[in-house]
């Protein structure tokens, strides 16, 4: 009798162990099904980046692309300011494993200043060099928007968010988390821009009531390109929305935002605009010595065949 009982106990313990092992083995499956992070919907972020040939281009794009590799559901629209697409950018994109669209359009810069230039460009002196400074990326961002509209028109899922990303800024992964919350237009602070430590929307009772900006504070939206994101479907609702060369320098952000929103409609993100998740960093122009001019006795080995 007791022998039978012991056997039954062993049997029960054995079955229990089996059930525990089974549950343990199948845990990842349950995790997959019930993990809210994985099952919840993530809107696509369309990052629009104009880029142009310069010595630090690959360095800047490498840093940016390797940040973007860590962002889920991200589509990079990169537009070269060039007559032709370059191998450097094409290879960098291919090797990145990112989802991307590679476009190009050359900025037509007039050699002679016209009345229009005086309006849209400023005469500025940087380190004793005086030259015209015109808005950059206008044609490139517009080309990207044309592509986006065509893409979304036939896309099954039109939801997403559009972010205009310059190629030499510094982006925390947190800024991408924030912009997925955008309903129409979301805004947040930008570090080290416009002569300030931080340029930011002022939030009162959860609403944007003004802006803390020192550079051209009379702009309708005194905010940097890196400081907002727009619901992608709104670009279908507003086919006329684009950047313009006809506005004065620093007004590109206001130019695009005016189609979609008003100050009091802006959605303050990044903890009610109290956190900095993006910085308007600028890569210093490298100064490279010209060995031919130096007339060295032992000139360095030529390195023109090496992509830098
Ligand atoms: N850009 C461009 N063509 C140019 C100059 C700039 O396509 O002739 C791009 C650049 O790569 C960057 C964006 O336009 O992604 C803004 O330019 P930049 O970073 O020089 O502007 P800033 O830092 O002065 O705001
Ligand atoms: Mn920049």
Image (cartoon, rainbow, N blue to C red):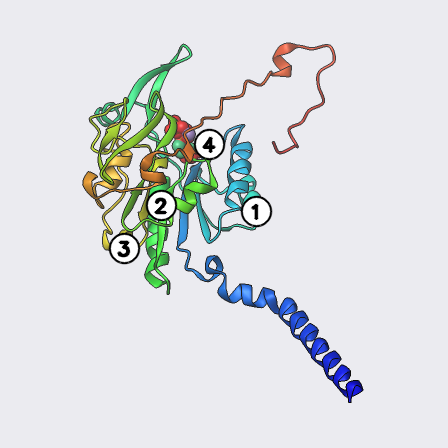
Asked if the residues shown at circle 4 and circle 3 are in contact, with their CB atoms under 8 angstroms apart, the answer is: no
Quadrant position of residue 48: top left
Q: Which residue is mark 1?
A: 96
Using the rendered view, name the quadrant where residue 169 is placed: top left
| Marks 2/1: CA–CA distance | 22 Å
Residue located beneath label 4 in the image: 168
Asked if the residue under mark 1 is in contact with the one under mark 2, i.e. CB atoms within 8 Å, the reply is no
Is 217 displayed left or right of 193 in the figure?
Answer: left
- Residue 145 position within the rendered picture, expressed as x and y whole percent measured from the top left: 33, 48
How many numbered marks does the figure carry? 4
How far apart are labels 1 and 4 at the CA level? 17 Å
Residue 103 seen in the figure: no
Is residue 123 something one can see in this rendering?
Answer: yes
**Mark 2 sits on what residue?**
143
The reply, left or right, for residue 92 in relation to residue 10 is: left
Q: CA distance from mark 2 to mark 4?
A: 20 Å
Mark 3 vs mark 1, CA separation in Å: 29 Å
- The residue indicated by pointer 3 is 236
| Mark toward the viewer: 2 or 4 | 4
């Amino acid at each position: 009798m007791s022998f039978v009982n012991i056997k039954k106990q062993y049997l029960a313990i054995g079955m229990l162990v089996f059930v525990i092992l089974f549950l343990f083995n199948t845990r990842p499956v349950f995790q997959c099904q019930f993990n809210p992070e994985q099952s919840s919907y993530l809107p696509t972020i369309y990052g629009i980046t104009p880029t142009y040939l310069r010595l630090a281009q690959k360095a800047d794009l490498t840093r940016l692309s390797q940040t973007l590799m860590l962002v889920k559901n991200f589509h990079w629209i990169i537009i070269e300011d060039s007559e032709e697409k370059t191998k450097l950018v094409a290879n960098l994109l291919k090797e990145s494993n990112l989802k991307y669209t590679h476009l190009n359009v050359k900025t037509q810069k007039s050699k002679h200043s016209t009345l229009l230039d005086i309006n849209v460009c400023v005469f500025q002196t940087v380190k004793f060099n005086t030259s015209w400074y015109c808005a950059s990326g206008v044609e490139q961002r517009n080309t990207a928007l044309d592509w986006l509209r065509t893409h979304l028109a036939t896309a099954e899922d039109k939801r997403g968010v559009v972010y205009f990303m310059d190629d030499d800024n510094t982006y925390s992964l947190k800024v991408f988390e924030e912009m997925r919350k955008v309903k129409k237009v979301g805004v947040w602070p930008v570090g080290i821009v416009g002569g300030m430590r931080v340029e930011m929307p002022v939030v009162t009772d959860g609403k944007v009531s003004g802006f803390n900006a020192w550079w051209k504070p009379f702009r309708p939206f005194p905010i940097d390109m890196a400081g907002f994101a727009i619901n992608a479907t709104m670009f279908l609702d507003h086919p006329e929305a684009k950047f313009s060369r006809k506005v004065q320098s620093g007004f590109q952000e206001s130019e695009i935002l005016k189609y979609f929103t008003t100050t009091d409609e802006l959605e303050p993100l990044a903890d009610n605009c109290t956190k900095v998740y993006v910085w308007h960093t600028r890569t210093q122009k490298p100064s490279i010595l010209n060995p031919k001019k130096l007339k060295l006795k032992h000139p360095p080995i030529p390195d023109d065949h090496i992509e830098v």
